[in-house]
Image (cartoon, rainbow, N blue to C red):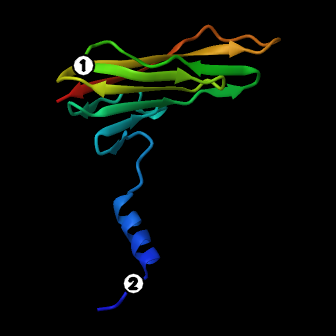
Amino acid sequence: MKAVPLTAALALTALAVCAPVSEATPSVRAGRVTLTNADNGHPVTVHTGDDVQVNLTGSHEAGLTYSWSVPVSDAAVLHRTAGSTTPRGDATARFHAERAGIAVLSAQRHCRAEPGHLCPLVVTPWKVRVEVK
């Protein structure tokens, strides 16, 4: 049997465990699902007791900042335990799956203009249907 240095063994273990995640697929860790801008419109299934982390990224271009509202849930199925926004337009929220059922997570992206710029009158919705089993 050949001895493998510890650092090489750890690196091989990390490669085997950490498969790349598609941008349109929620990132799943034991007990936690992470959703991003790319998950808009995609259904997600979690289990009672799991946490759902939402990380939405704003953008800035040509004097306009596109900012997200703090994500919310429309049902008692998912209870929000944290939520915040940043001046750059990002928004985050964490939800805990309290009981079985269906909930919709949602947020809205809106425009903030710098002086001398005008925003389009458009609000962009973000929604994810979450089934808790």
Q: Amino acid at mark 2?
A: Val
Residue with the most extreme bottom position: 1
Q: Is residue 26 above or below residue 132?
A: below
Q: Amino acid at mark 1?
A: Val
Left or right: 75 in relation to 87: left
Q: Are marks 2 and 1 in contact (CB under 8 Å)?
A: no
Q: Taking 24 as reference, is 120 above or below it?
A: above
114 with respect to 110 (left or right): right
Write down the residue under mark 2.
4
Residue at left offset 66%, top offset 22%: 87
- Where residue 54 sits in the image (x, y, percent)? 43, 29
In the image, residue 61 sits, relative to residue 12, either above or below, namely above
Q: Residue at x 23, y 32 (%)?
A: 49
On residue 77, which mark appears?
1
Disc 2 crowd rating (10 Å Cα; few below 14, some 14-19, many 20+) is few
Which corner quadrant of the image does residue 101 belong to? top left
Rendered image quadrant of residue 65: top right
